[in-house]
Image (tube, helix red, strand yellow):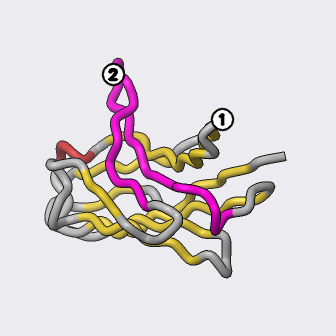
């Protein structure tokens, strides 16, 4: 059974930093492309960042230079380092595993950027 469990969300002030984590189980993590998506109220989920099996990354334009996605294959874990956060980054952040044939989502973690 595939499980993706996010943690690390919370309330942060504008300009601050936050690190999200995603613990995975039930997949061959090192062979899976992983990503972070976010969802605003009433909107579809949108890609924040993606990391392939070989470690190559791509980012949404809105977070380039501020967010960094990384993975630790030994720990089956995915991370999102969020720096210089802005109020418009407030959303539910979801971990995503792309097994091509099947795609899996975590339950999400709320990030609120507010003073």
Residue at the image position 28 percent from the left and 70 percent from the top: 17
How packed mark 1 is, by other alpha carbons closer than 10 Å (few <14, some 14-19, many 20 or more), is few
Q: Regarding mark 2 in the picture, which secondary structure is present there?
A: loop
- Where residue 94 appears, as percent x and y from the top left, is 49, 45
CA distance for labels 2 and 1? 25 Å
How many callouts does the rendering have? Answer: 2
110 horizontally vs 66: left or right: right
Residue 65, image x and y in percent? 15, 66
Image vertical order of residue 3 relative to residue 102, above or below: below
Callout 2 touching callout 1 (CB < 8 Å): no
In front: 78, or 19?
A: 78
Give the residue at x 80% y 55%. Answer: 26
State whether residue 115 appears in this view: no
Is residue 102 on the magenta stretch? no
- Give the residue pinned by disc 1: 101
SS at circle 1: loop
Stretch in magenta = 29-51
**Residue labelled with disc 2:** 43
């Amino acid at each position: 059974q595939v499980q993706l469990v996010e943690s690390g969300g919370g309330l942060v002030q504008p300009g601050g930093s936050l690190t999200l984590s995603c613990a995975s189980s039930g997949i061959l993590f090192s062979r899976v492309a992983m990503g972070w998506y976010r969802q605003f109220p009433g909107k579809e989920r949108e890609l924040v960042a993606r990391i392939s099996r070989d470690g190559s990354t791509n980012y949404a334009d809105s977070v380039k230079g501020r967010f960094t996605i990384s993975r630790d294959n030994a720990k089956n874990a995915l991370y999102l380092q969020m720096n210089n956060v802005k109020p418009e980054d407030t959303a539910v952040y979801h971990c995503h595993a792309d097994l091509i044939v099947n795609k899996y989502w975590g339950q999400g973690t709320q990030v609120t950027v507010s003073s």
